[in-house]
Image: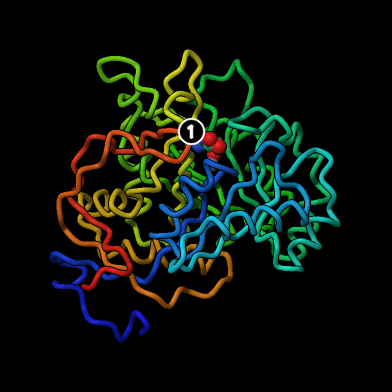
Amino acid sequence: MTSSDRPMNDADPGTQVGRRLTLRRPDDWHVHLRDDHMLAGVVNYTARQFARAIVMPNLSPPIITVAAAKGYRARILSAVEPGLTFEPLMTCYLTDTIDAGEVERGFSEGVFTACKLYPAHATTNSDHGVTDIRNIHRVLEVMQRIGMPLLVHGEVTDRHIDIFDREAVFIESILAKLIEDFPALKVVFEHITTADAVAFVEAGASNLAATITPHHLAINRNAMFDGGIRPHFYCLPIAKRETHRLALRRAATSGSAKFFLGTDSAPHTAGDKEAACGCAGIFNAPFAMESYAKSFDEEGALHRLEAFASENGARFYGLPLNEGLVVIERQDVNVPSRLATSSSEIVPFHAGEKLGWRFVPHDEPV
Ligand code: NCD
Ligand code: ZN
């Protein structure tokens, strides 16, 4: 069944959507699945909701070769529970010394879907990241020529720049020039958090797009300091003030094909978050679609969720749209305060909250 011949939602899209929302199966264009025990503990949350996911390469050591990506892809697939169909799309971590030939070979063999640019020391496991964009010019030339997307963590790393300004400064000091130098390169500005990024992406050509996370649609920076320090709302790029959250909501629900779903689900154990120097990252995979549905509903834009979650990203990447369907229904769901994996506990986004939406499992009769 394709989305054009499927049953309509309970009410007309565009007016009030009813109890049930049927969508083309969505994809997650930015996720951290980790490795080993953590991979086994988290991957099925993503695989239950999403058909495909762009898997971040910031393991330790990072994924920088075709062989490493193939091995990682196989480990991901073997951790997916039977009955789920899930396609991990692998990425290559750019370093100062990355081999352009290896990148091109990985793309042409269908192993690498994209390359990820972490400015060195910007975030978790980015120590091997790029110290100066000029160091990767040759690789960017190759990527531009072969149509391989560049995924950008858009923050400067200068400790003298205020943490809340690092994305805006990155646009002015690095991204604008990069796009000028490589006008035909496909660029995804990942997990945008500011009105500045929204405006920059909107003003750019059609080969510039952005992902938006569920948490940046839901929280502003107050969440991190609500009655005390709240490490589970700490991620990078850090949540900004309310005006920026509202700009992200406008962008996500605008209907523009330049904005699409990327959860940036980034699990860390509860202990690694609740520490004197807690890790950055929000684990939102277990209730990702519910969270997006809540934000789109609050904006009166549920009829725009399908394009954002299931169409815009695939079209940008030049990949086919998924054929399957998923159902999300209005129903109160209590988000657990902690989720146990085989080796640790992780606190999910929305822990302890009641969400008004439920993602209906694929094997549940509807
Ligand atoms: C990510 C992680 O933990 O790997 N953390 C985060 O806060 N988003 C890395 C990243 O995407 O910045
Ligand atoms: Zn990320």
Q: Quadrant of residue 6?
A: bottom left
Q: Which quadrant holds the C terminus?
A: bottom left
Observer-nearest residue: 360 or 64? 360
Disc 1 under 8 Å from ligand 1? The reply is yes
Q: For the point 32% across and 49% down, which residue is it?
A: 287
| Left or right: 35 in relation to 271 | right
Where is residue 195? Give x, y as percent: 41, 39
Q: For the point 37% across and 44% down, which residue is it?
A: 248
Task: Indicate the secondary structure of the residue bearing disc 1.
Answer: loop
Q: Is residue 237 visible?
A: no
| Left or right: 32 in relation to 4 | right
The kind of residue tagged 1 is His
Q: For the point 64% across and 46% down, which residue is it?
A: 57
Q: For the point 23% across and 51% down, which residue is it?
A: 299
Q: Is residue 22 visible?
A: yes
Where is residue 259? Give x, y as percent: 44, 56
Where is residue 23? Give x, y as percent: 32, 69
In this rendering, the answer to whether 227 lies above or below 294 is: above
Residue with the mark numbered 1 = 268
Where is residue 61? Give x, y as percent: 72, 38
Q: Quadrant of residue 213?
A: top left
Colouring convention used in this rendered image of the protein: rainbow
| Left or right: 67 in relation to 256 | right
In this rendering, the answer to whether 91 lies above or below 272 is: below
Observer-nearest residue: 146 or 25? 25
Q: How many marks?
A: 1
In the picture as drawn, the residue positioned furthest to the front comes out as 342
Observer-nearest residue: 84 or 294? 84
Q: Which quadrant holds the N terminus?
A: bottom left
